[in-house]
Amino acid sequence: MQGNQVEQDVPLIWTTKGNLPVASLEYYIGWEITDESIVFREQYRLDGEIVKENAHVKLLKGGEAVPETAQFQ
Amino acid sequence: MANTQGISGAAKQAMLAAVTDGKALKAALYLASATTGPTNAAYTATGEVTGSGYTAGGVSVTNANTAGLTGTTSFWTPSAAISFPTVTLATSFDAVMIYSTTDANRSLGVYTFTAQTITAGTLTLTMPTNDASTGLMRVA
């Protein structure tokens, strides 16, 4: 029972290989900043293979329409 | 004091409100190799991403905002981030279309970002500040 309790306390994360202990994975993060967005990407790798990848994209600016008025002739 | 010509801010706000306010909206993702853009009048499955956990047509967009007006510029932005949880999208994608299911899937716009892939994870699209300078849709 105590052994089971210890196992449940190990933080797991869902990956392409099922639930794996977070501590068994390599964690990488990266930022990409452009005029249109800021991207924060995080990867979890197992022996070099990406088994989980999240991305959080902040859109910086939307689109603009400019209606035109006509001149009276 | 001279007169000035121009479309009123109130009219611009009404134009924008007509396509955004109270509409049921969805967001769909498009492959980096696709050609989706402002010429698409409505949602299309052509070029849309496919993958585990992703349903064609995308996800619902929270739309609690109404078209705002600052000066003579009207603006609108979804009221919450758009999330695609627990997906695997192995082929690079770089665009999202926001469209109105209330109005026969009329496209409101296509927005691009740095190309991404997602593996057994979550994509979150956080909206720009909802104002006259950066709002997702602006009529200036």
Image: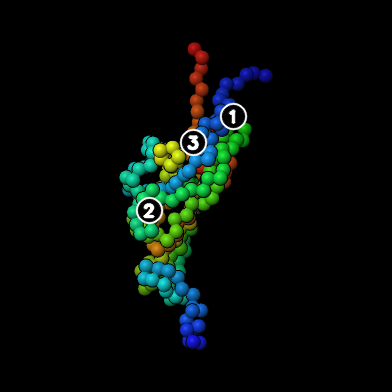
Residue in the picture at 33% in, 45% down: B45
Q: Which quadrant of the figure has residue B40?
A: top left
Task: Tell me whether marks 2 and 3 sit on the same chain.
Answer: yes
Residue B115, x across and y down, in percent: 40, 52
Q: Secondary structure at mark 3?
A: helix
Q: Is residue B45 left or right of residue A1?
A: left
**Residue behind mark 3:** B19
Q: Position of residue B116 (x, y in %)?
A: 40, 55
**Chain of the residue displaying label 2:** B
Residue B83: image location, x then y, percent: 47, 54
- Please give the chain letter of the residue carrying mark 3: B
Across and down, in percent, residue B113 comes to: 44, 49
Distance (Cα) linking label 1 and label 2? 38 Å
Left or right, B52 with respect to A67, comes to: left
Question: Against B54, is A70 above or below?
Answer: above
Q: Amino acid at mark 3?
A: Val
Disc nearest the viewer among 1 and 2:
2
Q: Which residue is mark 1?
A: B10
For the residues labelled 2 and 3, the Cα–Cα distance comes to: 24 Å
Q: Is residue B11 above or below residue B115?
A: above
Pointers 3 and 1 within a single chain: yes
Q: Secondary structure at mark 1?
A: helix
Residue type pointed to by label 2: Thr
Work out whether residue B61 or residue B94 is closer to the camera in this orientation and state it: B61
At a point 56% along the width and 32% down the height, the residue shown is B13
Secondary structure at badge 2 equals: loop
Mark 1, other Cα within 10 Å: few <14 / some 14–19 / many ≥20: some
Residue in the image at 53% along x and 35% along y: B17
Q: Residues within 10 Å of mark 2 (few under 14, many from 20)?
A: few
